[in-house]
Image: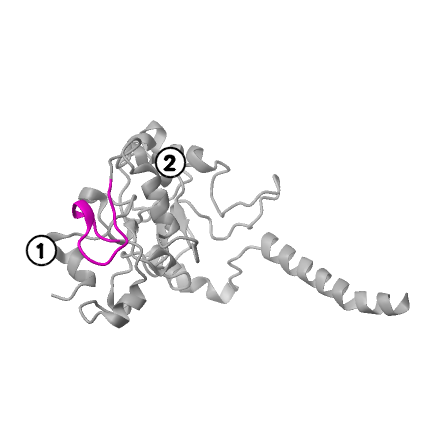
Amino acid sequence: MKKVFKRLIPILFLLMLSGIIVYSFTNNPPHQFKESQCGFCHLNYDYPLRFSNNITTLCNYCHGKKRNTLSHIVGIKPSMQTPADFHLDENGEMTCVTCHNIHMDSVDSVTGERSYLLWSNLRGREFCDACHGNTIAVVNSPVHSDVIETAHFGYYTGGVSSIDRVSIQCLGCHEGSTASHVSVTTKKGSPIVGSHPIGRDYMKAYKKDNTLRSPRSLSLEIKFFEGRVGCTSCHNPFSLAKHQLSITNEESKLCFECHLK
């Protein structure tokens, strides 16, 4: 019995340590800045606040732009009236802190739920409607309203299909009944009905094909979820551009982003 107990002690210790770590992570503010660090972002502490750089740039010093996520547009002036607690920068443009309070706790002290560092207690479509109202159903196109009510999606790794899971989500609607029909191919060669082939691992393809550009040289607007070429490599449901392209294709710029001239 004593031997069994001795064996359980390190296991119980690890469980307690894990619990403490998880509790600390979920309840403490994720941005625990020291007082000496305030000046890195803030130029003043009175409203309107002024910052040392563009707020999104400041956020990206740590978070960075990623190849495997899509997010709500920032750096634009909203076309609608925004709630008073959804803060715009000194130029009246959206930034990361329009929706997020970076000094907030990770867990709401009242509800016990994750706060997502949001200024409002609203979640999902209700949160979007705080600015968009009923227009959320017609932002860009009606069929994307269910997708873009999630301000950030992505971060997928691994999968059971040659097509990444974000593209599978796209094709789930673009089969002709809910949204316009899109025919795709996963084979190398001529695409079907003008659609670019998807499903190829870009890094592997780059190593074998000297007509492709290095992944490091590509715009971060070209997304490779699960490392594969997919719908979001060329399109972004948040984009305001024609055909919701990730970047402009004027003079085939989008095509030449990956393919050498």
Between 112 and 227, the one nearer to me in the picture:
227
Residue 256 image offset from top left, x and y in percent: 15, 61
Task: Determine the main secondary structure of the stretch shown in magenta.
Answer: loop
Quarter assignment of residue 7: bottom right
Between 261 and 151, the one nearer to me in the picture:
261
Q: Is residue 184 magenta?
A: yes
The type of residue carrying mark 2 is Asp
- Tell me where the magenta segment starts and ends, as one range: 182-197
Residue 99 image offset from top left, x and y in percent: 41, 44
Kindly identify which residue carries mark 1: 251
Residue 203 image offset from top left, x and y in percent: 31, 67
In the rendered view, would you say 238 is above or below 143? Answer: below
Kindly identify which residue carries mark 2: 146
In the rendered view, would you say 35 is above or below 247? Answer: below
The type of residue carrying mark 1 is Glu
Judged left or right of residue 253, residue 62 is right
Quarter of the N terminus within the rendering: bottom right
- Asked whether residue 43 is in view, the answer is no
Q: Residue furthest top?
A: 134
Q: Residues within 10 Å of mark 2 (few under 14, many from 20)?
A: few
Circles 1 and 2: CB distance less than 8 Å? no
Q: Is residue 3 magenta?
A: no
Q: Residue at x 35, y 52 (%)?
A: 163
What kind of element bears circle 2?
helix
In the rendered view, would you say 76 is above or below 204? Answer: above
Counting residues from the start of the chain, the first of labels 1 and 2 encountered is 2
Q: Residues within 10 Å of mark 1 (few under 14, many from 20)?
A: few
Residue 177 image offset from top left, x and y in percent: 29, 31
Judged left or right of residue 16, residue 235 is left
Q: Residue furthest left?
A: 251
